[in-house]
Image: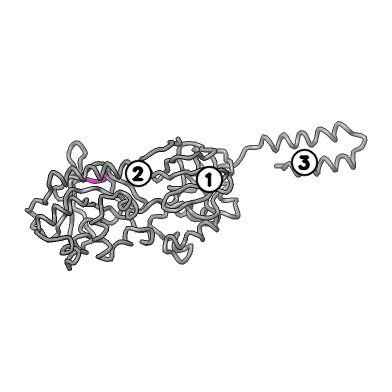
Amino acid sequence: QASISDCSLYFLSSKLTNKSQPVMRLSLPLVCFFQSWTAAADNIDKIITDSADHTTLETALTQAGLLATLGGAGPFTVIAPTDAAFTASLADLGAATTADLLARDDLAEILEYHVHPTAKVDPLEAGTIDTMQMMQATVTVQGAVTKVTGATEATISSKVDADNGVLHVSTDKILLPKPISTIATENGSFGVLLEALTKAGLAETFGLKNEGRLYTVFAPTDDAFNAYLTDKNITKEDLLNDANLGDILKYHVVAGRKLANEIQAEEVDTLHTGNKLTLAKNTDGAVTVNGVAVSGQEVLAGNGVIHVLASVLDPTADSTDTPTTTAAASEASGCAAAALTAAAAAVVVRLA
């Protein structure tokens, strides 16, 4: 395929060597320019593969089984971090090398967060944008500077059109979805849970620097903890100083991301070794955990999912005991779930 610069050189050559053929002198460069201008772009996968600046992205997409997807019909919008952006993001993930990043269990989640799977969005406009990972990212535009934000902020430096969409290139950071710890903090209804996780040394388990492990958290609200403290006739300080605090918290966590539509009647292992949760689902699709109803919709995070509970699950309680749930705690858990869902799905301008 001839480029415009190739045409210019060819035109100059024709002027020098074909002085008696003025028609040829004009027609050749015009035909060449037309061919270059009408030539089709490549698909996104080919553009990434051919780019000297996106070798890490190519490797990651291939490893996650997503590169071929981006060669499909689309259309796709891809935030395409360069090799330099991957390197600059290692510290955010607590990774020493690119190999550490590529070994993360949540690699596919991270990459899917860079892809809007149903449209070519160009230009990027201020608002929110859906992603293949199912969480939204936020787009901000200030003058000529466009940034896409999740847990990190990627500045868009250029764009490349493709047959099946568009790539918006980021050279400073990769785009990371918010982890469980950030979403729970922003919600405001899980103060006791977060304080307890910090006290037990478990806070980083649900942050960005957890080596990419995925978790399902059945998260009691503050009102659920208050009901638990009343039932046990203890203070929050007593709970935080309980030698079994870590086990109580781990009893609320299952390894891997388990969405509501994947839950069935079953017993599942928790991070509290040797202790299981009993999951059930009624005909309406409502989920219960040890007989406690999950409130509202699940909330996705970059490293898992949160299901809101109106009760604290106690691994030391007799299996026949009914967990304490006050009406206030149940109502508050519904509000927390609604707030989480609203925060995750809030749309300033939906780009679709």
Can see residue 164? no
Q: In the image, which is nearer the foreground, mark 3 or mark 1? A: 1
Of 291 and 129, which appears nearest the observer?
129
User: Left or right: 197 with respect to 115?
Assistant: left
Residue at mark 2 to residue at mark 3: CA–CA distance: 52 Å
* Viewport quadrant of the N terminus: top right
State the mark number for residue 146: 1
**Hey, which quadrant is residue 34 in on the image?**
top right
State the mark number for residue 344: 2
User: Left or right: 17 with respect to 189?
Assistant: right
> Callout 3: helix, strand or loop?
helix
Residue at mark 3 to residue at mark 1: CA–CA distance: 35 Å
Q: Which residues are magenta?
A: 260-264
Of 237 and 346, which appears nearest the observer?
237
Can see residue 178? yes
User: As shown in the figure, which amino acid type bears the numbered disc 2?
Assistant: Ala
User: As shown in the figure, which amino acid type bears the numbered disc 3?
Assistant: Cys
